[in-house]
Amino acid sequence: MKIVTVIGARPQFIKAAVVSRAIAQHPDMQEIIVHTGQHFDENMSDIFFEEMQIPKPDYNLHINGLGHGAMTGQMLEKIEAVLLEEKPDWVLVYGDTNSTLAGALAACKLHINVAHVEAGLRSFNTNMPEEINRILTDRISNLLLCPTETAIRNLEQEGFGNFGCKVENIGDVMQDAALFYAPRAKRPAQAVPEDFILCTVHRAENTDDNRKLQNLFGALEQISAQTTVVLPLHPRTRKKLESAHYDFGNSRICFIEPVGYLEMVWLLSHCRMVMTDSGGLQKEAYFFKKFCLTLREETEWVELVENGVNRLVGTDRDTITAAAAQCLAQPANMTENQLYGNGHAGEKVVEMVYNYRKS
Ligand code: UDP
C-alpha cells in the first residue's frame, strides 16, 4: 500500500513524525513524503526532520510567502502532479493549514482516498483561515481520524453520518509525540531563566491586528516584571513586531528563536505555566501538567477548559495580567492525563488506513 503524506508546517512535522514511525514499521506500507515548503527555515522545518527522525521528504515543492489563494492554488497544482506520478492508494493530511486543504483536494479530484488526521475540530470562528481548511478537508476525506469525542460530536452535528465517510476517535498523535520525546528533552542552547512562563504567539487573528498585538505584548511585558516570559518568536510575529517598531532592546520578555521539539519539551517540563494562542501548545501544557492561559476568545480544545486546566483570556491586557497573577499565586490542581488517548494514536492511524473498507 502506497501512502503520500502531505505536510508543510511545523505542527504537521511533529504529528507526521509519530505516524511516519508507525508506517515504517508496517511491512506492507510505503510512505512518500511531500513537503509543500510552507515553513522552510532551518528552525521551523529542518530541525524537526533531523531531531524527530522524519524521513527526508521525497518532494519539496518550495511554496511559501504567498497569499492564501496563490499558496493553496500552487500547492494544488504541484501536489496533483506528484499524485499523478506516484499513484498512491491514500493521501494522508494533518490539521488545518493550506497544505492540508490542497493535499486533500488534489487527492479527492483524482479519486484517491484521503485520511485526515485531527479531523472534526472546530472553533466555530470562520474568520480563522484554519477553520475553513478544517471544514473543507473533513468534507472531502474518506477517513476522518478524530482526536477527541468533542470532534466526533462536531462531525455528527454537521451531518457527517450521511456522507459515506468513516469517522473514528483514535486519540491525539500529539499525545504520542509528548510521551515518546519527553525522555529525549534537551535544555535549550539559548539562555533561559530558571523560573519562567512559556509563551507563544503566532495566530494571524492576533498578529495581524495591531491593537491586539499591542495589548498582548503590553500584558506580557507587565507579567515579565514579576516572572520572566520566555517566548520563542515565530517569524510571522517577529515581522509584525518589527514593523510596529517594537522596542526589543528594552523588553523584559526573554525572546528566543523558535526551538526544535526536543527543546520545546524541555521548556514545557520546566515552565511555571503556559500562555499561548497555539492549538498544539494548549494540549502540550496539559500533557506536561501546566496550566494554560489561552490568548484567544475560543478554542477547539474545549475539554481543557471544561476540565479547568485552560482558561480563555482573549487579548485584553488587564484580563491577561490579572489571570496570570492569579495563576502564579495559586497554581491550579492539574487533573490526570487522559483526555487525548493513550499514546498509540500513530499506530491507530496506520491500522485504520490499512484496514479501511468503504462503507
Ligand atoms: N513548537 C516548537 N518550537 C517552537 C514553538 C512551538 O517545537 O519554538 C511546537 C509546539 O511544541 C507544538 C507545535 O510546535 O508541538 C505547535 O505549532 P504551532 O503553535 O506553530 O501551530 P498550531 O498548533 O497552533 O497549529
Image (cartoon, grey):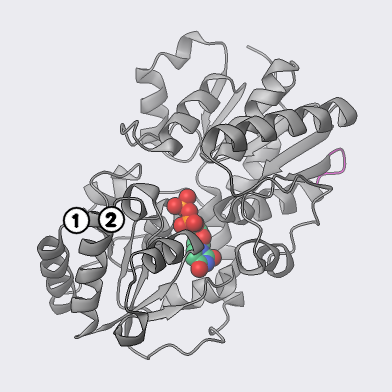
Decide which of 315, 69 is in the foreground and name it: 69
Q: Position of residue 251 (x, y in %)?
A: 30, 83
Q: Is residue 349 above or below residue 242?
A: above
- Residue 102 as seen in the image, left or right of residue 320: right
For the residue carrying disc 2, how many other residues have a C-alpha within 10 Å: few (<14), some (14-19), or many (20+)? some
Q: Which mark is residue 210?
A: 2
Q: Position of residue 165 (x, y in %)?
A: 57, 17
Type of amino acid under label 2: Asn
Q: Is residue 99 above or below residue 87?
A: below
- On whether ligand 1 comes within 8 Å of the CB at mark 2, the answer is no
Decide which of 68, 105 is in the foreground and name it: 68
Q: Which residue is mark 1?
A: 313
For image coordinates 41% across by 57% down, the residue present is 202
Q: Position of residue 301 (x, y in %)?
A: 35, 45
Q: Is residue 186 magenta?
A: no
For image coordinates 37% across by 91% down, the residue present is 194
Q: In the figure, residue 125 lies in which quadrant?
A: top left
